[in-house]
Image (spheres, coloured by chain):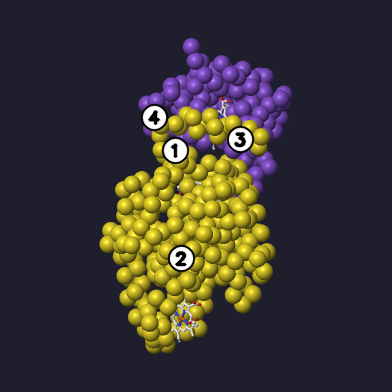
Amino acid sequence: MKHASVLGLVVALGASHALADIVAPTEVVYENGAVATSLSGAPGDPDSGAEIMNKGAGNCIACHQVSALDHLAFHGEIGPPLDGVADRWSEAELRGIVANAKLTFDGSMMPSFYKTEGFVRLGNAYTGKAHADGEVAPLLSAQEIEDVVSFLLTLTED
Amino acid sequence: MGIRPIALIIAGLAAAGTAWAQDSDEMNIEGLEIVTETEAPEHLENLRTIYSGWRFRTDETQSLQLDDFENPAFVFIDQALDAFDEAGANGNACSTCHENGPEEFAGFTAAMPKVMDGKLTTTEDFLNGHRAETQGEEPWKWSSQDMQQMVALIGLQSRGMPVDVAIDGEAAPYWELGKEMYYTRYGQLELSCANCHEDNYGMMIRADHLSQGQTNGFPTYRLKQAKLISRHNRFRGCIRDTRAETFAEGSDEFRALELYVASRANGLSVETPAVRQ
């Protein structure tokens, strides 16, 4: 049964890109905090990225102000505003920051969005209960990281 | 950590013009002066000044706390006053023995939690033990309104007095554990109490204006929940929001955390019952 469904997934994704192209959270190669190639093996979708900035496990504007997302209420002030961020950082650097900001900013308060181990008292999402044994999903999937990075790349000052 | 101050400065600049820090309002409740800002206690290495959470709230929320007739928590205080006169299982009411009323308990809350009979004891622990002993009563649940309104009534008797919990002697090992918890980055979001309430108080996190996370106003009346909130319930919520497995209300861990957090407010006035958003 299990086998069949896994195969089904591979077939479904097969049309655009194979599952094998996805880099697992534990296998990401960081160079000075930066990640050179797409984590999903596919390009990102900036519109989807903009959505993720606002909701769910992304919720970047909880901590960052983003003028391009002015239509959304309540931008936080914990991190720097992300306006013009594409002028300050390369695509690889941005991918690294979104995947695991602590490798660029030592001790950063920014959550590590593509990380699955090393947590203290990992919970089951926001239930307050322990995470059941078994696979830990990163906060954002490989494709979601790519989507966010492609959105960040639209944030130029000029 | 080296980059933190830079981020703080940038974030501060971004927020210039908005109300990004504590305000400068002073609190006076019908003639009683409440200290909402004072020098941090010596044991606090990373803060120079401590502020009541009241200073971070909107004017509307603040004003509710300035008048006991407007403060919605007083509905519960009144219920606790009634309960004070009600006979327990063995016929004793609190007032049977405490003939001068709850006023006898002035100063009690300012020093809580503290070690009693070798065990770190919160007001909730004390009340459950005391009720069993003197009234033959069953324990109240930690965050039940029966419990929290009595905790609030007792706390009110210390209103205006400086928080002054002991952190040395027998309390020291509990305090150390609480401190360690305060700086532990819990959950999938890997956030510690200090990340939000020490490094970033005064900042907005999404729609929330971060305070120093002080407990001197607890139990607080939360407008959103329309009831009294216990200290442990607040801790539980803050840890849950880091996508962590939280601790139970009434756990030894939360007792220790309660002591440590209370000690960070040493010098601020007890404000019980405070009003929060």
Image location of residue A132, percent across then percent down: 60, 49
What is the crowding at mark 4: few (fewer than 14 residues within 10 Å), some, or many (at least 20)?
A: few
In the image, is residue A107 above or below residue B131? above
The colour chain B appears in is: yellow
Labels 3, 2: one chain: yes
Question: What type is the residue that disc 1 sits on?
Answer: Trp
Question: What type is the residue that disc 2 sits on?
Answer: Met
Which residue is identified by label 2? B161
Question: What type is the residue that disc 3 sits on?
Answer: Arg
Which residue is identified by label 4? A72
Q: Quadrant of the N terminus of chain A?
A: top right
Chain letter of the purple region: A
Labels 4, 3: one chain: no
Which mark is in front, 1 or 4? 1
Which mark is in front, 4 or 3? 3
- Secondary structure beneath dot 4 equals loop
Q: Is residue A12 shown left or right of residue B56?
A: right
Q: CA distance from mark 4 to mark 3?
A: 27 Å
Could one spot residue B72 in this view of the protein? no
**Mark identifier at residue B43:** none
Which residue is identified by label 3? B4
